[in-house]
Image (cartoon, rainbow, N blue to C red):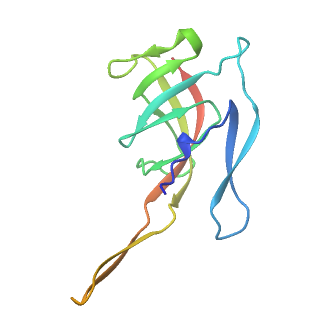
Amino acid sequence: GSFRQSTWPSRGRAATWVRKHPGTRLTRRLGPKIMSPRGFTMYAIIQIAGHQHKVKENDVILTDLTGHDISKEFKCEDVIAVGEGESLKVGAPFVKGASVSLKVLEDTRSPKISGMHYKKRKGIRRHWGHRQDLQKLQVLKIQG
């Protein structure tokens, strides 16, 4: 299957990615719930490297390479929607004046995908593999 962290349910909690043992896959550890006084959680839908992610403050997401160096902070102004509950603002295509501050935590790679083309009795065998280069980003602040 695909490795898409942003679609996993967090149930209003901040999530951190931890590696239990060296060389194993990242597993997700959920922290305490982060809720606003009205019971809704402020979130934003942002577009990074052609992919859309639903993020909250302190979330850690995996995305394709952004071109920023490790431990650098940058702003993403491609915000499709921002808000909470009934105060949700949806842009066409982006919300004006909204931005999300992100920090690059590390560069990593996805798990290996291997495939094979094979035709019986024809001598056609081709094996291939792929690992996507990814960046782990932390959401620092949502403005909008």
Number of marks drawn: 0
Specify the farthest residue to the left: 122
Which residue shows up at 51% across the image and 14% down it?
88
Closer-to-camera residue (117/119): 119
Side of 44 where 10 appears, left or right: right
Which residue shows up at 69% across the image and 36% down it?
14
Instruction: Please say if 12 is above or below 68.
Output: above
Can you give x and y, in whole percent of width and height, for residue 101 in the image?
53, 32
Classify residue 93 by image quadrant: top left
Instruction: Please say if 57 is above or below 30.
Output: above
Instruction: Please say if 128 is above or below 111.
Output: below
Specify the farthest residue to the front: 121
Closer-to-camera residue (89/126): 126
Can you give x and y, in whole percent of width and height, for residue 21 in the image?
72, 67
Can you give x and y, in whole percent of width and height, for residue 50 in the image?
35, 41
Which residue shows up at 72% across the image and 22% down it?
35
Closer-to-camera residue (138/47): 47
Can you give x and y, in whole percent of width and height, for residue 83 in the image?
54, 17
